[in-house]
Image (cartoon, grey):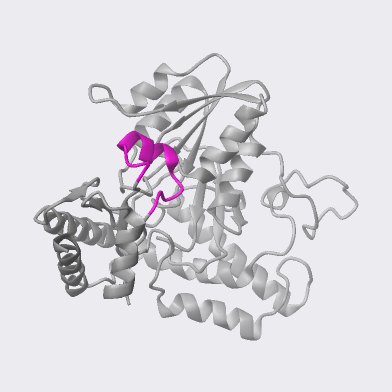
Amino acid sequence: MVYFDNAATGGFKISAVTDAAQTVLKYLCANPGRSGHRLSLTGAGIVNNARDALSETFNARSERVIFTKNCTEALNMAIFGSLKDGGHVITTVFEHNSVLRPLFTLKNKGLIDLDVVEPQVNKPLHLLIEEKVKPNTYLIVATAVSNVTGYELPIEDIGMIAKKHGLHFLVDGAQGGGHIPIDMKKNNISMLALAGHKGLYGIMGSGVLIIDDETELEPMLYGGTGSETFNFSQPKCYPERLEAGTLNLPAIASLNEGVRYINKNLKNFSTHLYGTTKNILSGLKTIPNAECFSAPNRTGIVAFRLNNMPSSEVADILNADYDIAVRGGLHCAPLTHKFLSTENEGLVRVSVAVQNSSREVEYFLRAVKEISAR
């Protein structure tokens, strides 16, 4: 199968990533941080190595790197953990439901006031966000990259607005992590949520929340941490405060290898994906009735629709007749589709990795051309 669904989960894992997970499963079935024997200490060392790799990549302190089961959990942890009752939050139309559902849940319960900002032709997005700041605003939430179109939000500019007004800034790095440089200090990011199984090359079950030194979060989970046993509240220190229960050591071990791999190749991979998306878009523009909603980008995402067909139907034909995996539908980002006026038929999303070949791109474009001609 031609796998063009890398924005959902990375379809290509280097051997170091899979070997790390397999080694843990075979030889290291011990709970890191819960015992003092050699196996447990070895597991704890792997976890600490992964924290170090992530802290170096995103410019944060290792003890402020929190492991979660996915990016959704990390975002919920940040949104609910930073809640200020009666406060005001600003977000954008480009957000995934992992952001929108927690925020609208709080809004519908009357716990927060919420503004959702959409782009305008004559004013930059970060200035539109600043216009929404109120005396009770405490949080700005923005994705680094739209999971629908690959559009990169100006997180550095938004971070400056947050710093100027003394606000927390939460970035959803699910699609940006491993594809574009994200520097928490340079971008004034308070909280960064990441999906380990996408651009960071880890396996499923790996997510991360990184918080800066000024951010304090209320825990969502309460339980064992291997420390402060007679404290019937969660410990105050990080990462234990937010990491209750047993960690997913195979996923963390794989993520450690994936992050170190991407650190060596980020610039080259970004350049390659920009060129690949440019070639796909150029090819789609030659096909009658193919309408594109992306620009060339560093994350490998191209969104289009064809003949006004339901996007799920196009995706099904590509799967059944051509053995090509893409994603159709609304991509869990309803306000993005409403903004693009594609909420009825959705969009076909092609998401490539650097491992995808030019021959696969050519084959895909021929397939779309044939479908258009039917």
Q: Number of numbered discs present? A: 0
**Left or right relative to 229: residue 225:** left
Q: Is residue 88 visible?
A: yes
**Height in image: 309 above or below 5?**
above
* View extreme (bottom): residue: 26
Foreground residue among 350 and 297:
350
What range is drawn magenta here? 329-344
Foreground residue among 183 and 362:
362
* View extreme (right): residue: 230
**Left or right relative to 151: residue 249:** right
**Height in image: 118 above or below 201?**
above
Residue in view at x 36 percent, y 22 percent: 128
Q: Position of residue 352 (x, y in %)?
A: 29, 63
**Height in image: 55 above or below 162?**
below
Magenta includes 331?
yes
Q: Position of residue 182 (x, y in %)?
A: 39, 47
**Left or right relative to 99: residue 307:** left
* View extreme (left): residue: 286
* View extreme (front): residue: 374
Q: Position of residue 264 (x, y in %)?
A: 34, 65
- The quarter of the picture where the N terminus appears is bottom left
Foreground residue among 367 and 91:
367
Residue in view at x 33 percent, y 70 percent: 319
Q: Position of residue 73 (x, y in %)?
A: 60, 51
Residue in view at x 43 percent, y 44 percent: 333
Q: Is residue 351 visible?
A: no
- The quarter of the picture where the C terminus appears is bottom left
Residue in view at x 36 percent, y 27 percent: 126
Magenta includes 25?
no
